[in-house]
Structures are given as structure tokens and as C-alpha cells.
Amino acid sequence: MSSTTANGGDQDIEREVPQEQRALVLAPKAKKPRIDCIDGCRFALVFPIIVGHFVKFGTENKVLLKLLTQENVFVGGFFIISGYVSGYVATNVGERDHDRKKLANPELFFWQKVMSYYPLHFLVSTLFSPMFVMVDRWMNNPWKTTVFHGLLNYSLSQAWFPSEAEIWNPPTWFLSALSFVNFTLPTMILPQVAALSKDGLRKLMLGLGALSIVQKVSYSQAWQFYCRGEYICRTSSPHLWNTTRFHPFWALVEVTMGIAAAREVMLDTPEENGSRWKVHPLLLYVAAHASVALRITKFNLNDALIRSTLFVPLYLKFLQAMHRDCLSSSPTLMTRFFGSSLMTRLGALAFPMFILHGPIGQLLYKKAVANRVFGRVMPMKFFPVYLGIVMLASHVVNEGFVKNKKVQRLSAWLSQFLADRTTGMLRDQGDKLPSMQQKTLSFEGVVASKVGK
């Protein structure tokens, strides 16, 4: 390895490397197998979220409403999967290190992440902007408020504003929080988590989980620990609730837990795999989803507590179990199901469904809009049709826009363009000073040397 000295010369620096580390460095890197079963889980998460947002227009059954309106619980699963996939893709199997090639340009890494979802967000926001603006006007909001809402929406900064987090297309607060997370990943999170041992990763997950629970207990202590028996628990402190479920910091906590969970599996040794008592992924999946059933018992905890104390820890274990099962010689039926071509294709629709279901639902069910467009809000028997419309529209958008080569090339160009203009934002560029600054420093050095003489 060479290092540049102060006078511009190069010198070799010998570093003593322990024998076991030297063997690890010289060993060939393990190839990463695809884990399609993780992608298949996305549809199983997005569908209950979509149902939960508008199911009150599909049934009056109070038990069903209690069970199906806990979409805030399932959003935690999306943050975990985002972290799990990022950790798997950007770090090395069998090594306590990150993929230096993938993270060599952290600014490009960040902008590529953003451009993987921003084009569709921009398209849907623009297509439905007349409806969003008119709703603002019908609510008697001043124009400056409407302009402010538009600015928050297009800049994906609404998650930072508890009173405005659900403006225009409410589910996109997720993208707002995720953008902050992606900003931290290439330099602040992934390299540090990748360097941890398995013991350290477990302790990190426990610590972050405890931190999340403390915040949810704090929120519950300020409001209430239990729901009041109705299918919806209208908080008397909406800003506190929005800070609890929308704030980007708590999204970062869950994403980091997902990264740590993936890293723990990636550091498995053959000896550990042979001696480990395996839990069937189905048991963990059922246990995680069954946590929402507490709503129909006397232990009807609020969504924030269910999410942090039960769903998130169980879903992390489920992803790890399915990941390990996927790598085994005989995966279980459930792992094969989530990795099937059907679930993979449905998983590809998860993001378009997440973005589109809100505006389509507003058009059909929001009184201020539906009464003016259709003369009424759609009847309850129309709800399955609404779900079908969302899936069909998502398929069309996925095939015609998300997969469009021109859109992908434009996204890649924008990522590179923005990365070039933000170079140094996420990494030290002290050794790559602009030419004019280098000339100035050289001139000052000459002057200083002559004065010294």
C-alpha cells in the first residue's frame, strides 16, 4: 500500500496483519445468491396497508375494522426490508466489511437510491396535482399554504413537519423519511454496521429496539396505552402521534435494525448453520402478523406499541429465518412460495401500489372530490373494484413507466449529474482541491519558504 507524503513522494507502509485476518483477506470472496423471497414479502406488506387506508368504505364490521386498520404496524416491515436489502447488497458475505466498490462514491449511491423512487413520485404528484390543489382550495387554505404543501411534496420533506406530514398523497411521507435514511447509509451507517461482529450486531439490534420502545412508551404515557374500543383511536395529540410514526429518525432506527439483521446472517459459518436449531419461517410470519389481533382483545395496545414491541422483532426474526432457509439445500414451502415468480412479480407492484392507492382512493372516496366528480362516494360493494383498479393501474405504471428504458436512463443521468455537483457532501475531499485553490496554496508555500530563508 502506498501513501503520499507532504512533499509529494510515495512510500510503502508495511502493516502487520494477524495471520487469521491475512487468510481472510486472501480468501476468495463468497458470491451472493439472490434472495427473491425477500422481494416477494413486499406485496404481503403493501396489501394490508392499502386495505387499511380505505377499508372503512368497504365494511361496517367492527371486528374487521379493528383488525384491518393497523397499517401503521405494517409500515415498520417496509423499513426493515429496506434496511435488510441495503445491508445485503452493500456489504460482503463472510467478512466484516462493506462493498467498497458500491460505496466508493457515496453521493452517487445516495442519488441513485432517491432516483429509484422519485420519478414515479413526481409523475403521480403531477398527474393528480389538480385534485390536490383543488382540495386545498375547498378546505379554504390560502394560496401560500397550497404552495407550501407543493414544496414539501416535491422536495420530499413533509415527514419533518408533524402538522403537514399527510399533505397531498399521504403515504409518500414514507419516501420523505426514507430519503433521510438513504442520506446516512453510505458513510454513516453501512460501513460501521458492516464492521461489527455477530455479537455486536445482536447488541445493536437490542439497543435500537429498546430505544424505539422507550419512545413509543413516552408517546403512550403522554396519550394512552390502549385504544378505546373503536376501530380507530383518534388521538388528542395528533402532532405527537405524527412525530412518533413519521419522524425520519425512527425510520433510520428500523432500517438500521434491518441492516444488522442481514449482516448477522451474512456472517454465518457452516458450523453454525449445521448446529443451529431452525425455527420454521411460517411460525415467525404468523406470530408477527398475529400481533395485530391484540386490538380485538382486552390487551388492545395502540399501533405504536404493537409495532415496536412485537411486530418489528418478530418480523426481523422471520426475515432471518427465511434468508437462512433460502440458502439451504431444501427450502421450506413458504420460502419457495415467497420466492416464486408469482410473488416476485407481485412484489414488483408493491411500490407503484403504495404510491397510487392514495390518490385513487381520494378520487373515489374523499367526499369533497367524489361528490363533485361522481355525484357520490363509492358504495361499500365497490371496494373490491377499487383494489382491482389499484392493482391494474400499478401494473400499467410498472410496465410502462418504471421499466421504461428512457426513464431509467434519465434517472441514471440525473443521479450522476447530482452526484457530480454534490461531491464532497458525504466524504472528505481534502486531497482533491480545486486547481485554483491548489495554485494559491502552492504560491503561499513558496512565499513562506523564502521568508523562512
Image (cartoon, grey):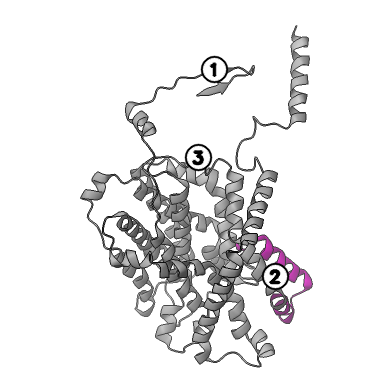
**Where, by quadrant of the figure, is residue 425 drawn?**
top right
Residue pointed to by mark 1: 11
Q: What's under tag 1, amino acid-wise?
A: Gln
Q: Which residues are magenta?
A: 132-159
| 3D distance between C-alphas at marks 2 and 1 | 57 Å
Pinpoint residue 314: horizontal percent, then vertical percent: 35, 62
Evaluate if marks 2 and 1 touch, with contact meaning CB atoms under 8 Å apart.
Answer: no
**Where, by quadrant of the figure, is residue 25 drawn?**
top left
Pinpoint residue 348: horizontal percent, then vertical percent: 49, 66
Q: Secondary structure at mark 1?
A: strand
Residue pointed to by mark 3: 100
Disc on the earlier residue, 2 or 1:
1
Residue at (45% x, 45% y) in the render: 91
| 3D distance between C-alphas at marks 3 and 1 | 23 Å
Horizontal arrangement in the rendering, residue 428 relative to residue 391 (left or right)? right
**Residue lying furthest top:** 453
- Residue 162 vs 90, above or below: the answer is below
Pinpoint residue 58: horizontal percent, then vertical percent: 49, 87
Q: What's under tag 3, amino acid-wise?
A: Arg
Horizontal arrangement in the rendering, residue 337 relative to residue 240 (left or right)? left
Q: Which mark is residue 256?
A: none
